[in-house]
Image (cartoon, rainbow, N blue to C red):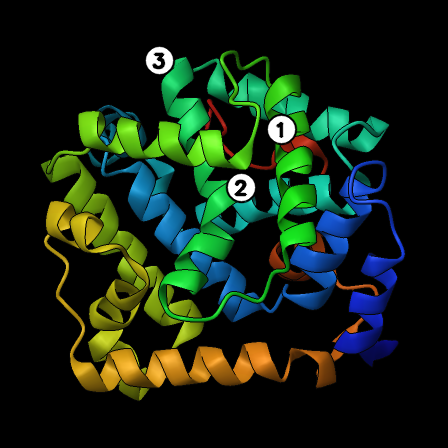
């Protein structure tokens, strides 16, 4: 496996055009430079926790306890990351990217998803990697990278046939905040899903002695209102300080990290765990069981 310094990845991104080369910058930023499995899984876990703070989405995912999100939590999460990994590897406009987006659309067609719910899911993907880390004091992303992230995810949303997509990141953030004010509410379905997500986070990301603190650790990454909705514990000062310091060290030494030049979330969360699969074999299977 060929590796390079994070500084070289940043230099390569600076040489690219943030608009014309947005897909490649998004890949280099989100995958090559910051695609460490534990970090990716943690941020995606919080994104899922945010989505099920909306009772309508929680009900769709829980399905009276039969949903993949509670029956096969880790695999379901891995499959979701595989979809986004494929899009980041190939670009949403590529033939491969179009095939994976079409598969997403096929899955979503089975469920009563509102356009606003899909837009909110988009906001968790486009905004949260920066917003969640910045809230802890240190984001690993530059303004140019963030602009390219948004152009990448906006393309995905357009190919998913969403409408009313905000024009800018700032407009999307305002829209998402208003959506949360209107839609967030406690639900038993949501809390059951969160319990499964927290257990899966502990199993995937934490050494066994720390798993008793899994809810406190993931709670440190969650905004206060999100913790309140799901009844998650407020992290104590020791946990909060350790996470902030760990993130600070990670961000400020990122240029010195040796990162794999060919890193792929689709491989790390898919092929290496479940073998190579076509789009039709990934995600929700209507005839399962």
**Residue contact between numbered discs 2 and 1, judged by CB atoms under 8 Å:** yes
- Residue 228's spot in the image, x, y percent? 11, 51
Q: Residue at x 62, y 38 (%)?
A: 150
- Badge 1 local density, few (<14 within 10 Å), some, or many (20+)? many
- 276 sits to left or right of 43: right
In this view of the protein, which residue sits in the foreground, 220 or 100? Answer: 220
Q: Secondary structure at mark 2?
A: helix
Q: Is residue 68 at least partly visible in the picture?
A: yes
Q: Earlier in the sequence, mark 2 or mark 3?
A: 3
Give me the C-alpha separation between circle 1 and circle 3. Answer: 22 Å
Q: Which mark is residue 154?
A: 1
> Quarter of the image containing the N terminus?
bottom right
Tell me which residue sits at (56%, 76%) in the image: 251
89 to the left or right of 193? right
Location of mark 3 (residue): 112
Calculate the distance from the C-alpha at mark 2 to the C-alpha at mark 1.
8 Å
Label 3, secondary structure: give it: loop
Q: Is residue 147 above or below residue 43?
A: above
């Amino acid at each position: 496996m060929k590796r390079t310094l994070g500084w070289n990845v940043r230099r390569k991104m600076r040489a690219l055009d943030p608009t014309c080369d947005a897909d490649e910058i998004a890949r280099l930023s989100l995958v090559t430079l910051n695609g460490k499995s534990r970090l990716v899984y943690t941020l995606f876990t919080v994104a899922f926790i945010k989505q099920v703070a909306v009772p309508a989405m929680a009900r769709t995912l829980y399905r009276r306890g039969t949903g993949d999100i509670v029956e096969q939590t880790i695999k379901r999460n891995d499959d979701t990351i595989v979809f986004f990994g494929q899009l980041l590897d190939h670009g949403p406009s590529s033939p491969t990217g179009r095939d994976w987006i079409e598969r997403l659309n096929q899955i979503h067609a089975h469920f009563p998803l509102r356009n606003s719910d899909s837009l909110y899911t988009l906001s968790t993907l486009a905004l949260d990697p920066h917003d969640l880390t910045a809230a802890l004091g240190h984001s690993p992303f530059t303004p140019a990278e963030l602009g390219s992230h948004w152009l990448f995810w906006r393309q995905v949303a357009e190919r998913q046939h969403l409408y009313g997509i905000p024009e800018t990141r700032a407009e999307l953030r305002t829209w998402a905040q208003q959506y949360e004010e209107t839609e967030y509410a406690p639900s038993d379905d949501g809390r059951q899903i969160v319990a499964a997500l927290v257990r899966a986070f502990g199993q995937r990301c934490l050494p066994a002695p720390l798993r008793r603190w899994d809810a406190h650790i993931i709670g440190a990454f969650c905004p206060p209102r999100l913790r309140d909705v799901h009844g998650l514990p407020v992290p104590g000062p020791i946990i909060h300080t350790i996470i902030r310091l760990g993130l600070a060290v990670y961000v400020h030494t990122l240029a010195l990290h040796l990162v794999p030049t060919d890193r792929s979330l689709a491989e790390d969360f898919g092929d290496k765990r479940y073998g190579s699969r076509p789009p039709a074999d990934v995600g929700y299977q209507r005839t399962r069981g």
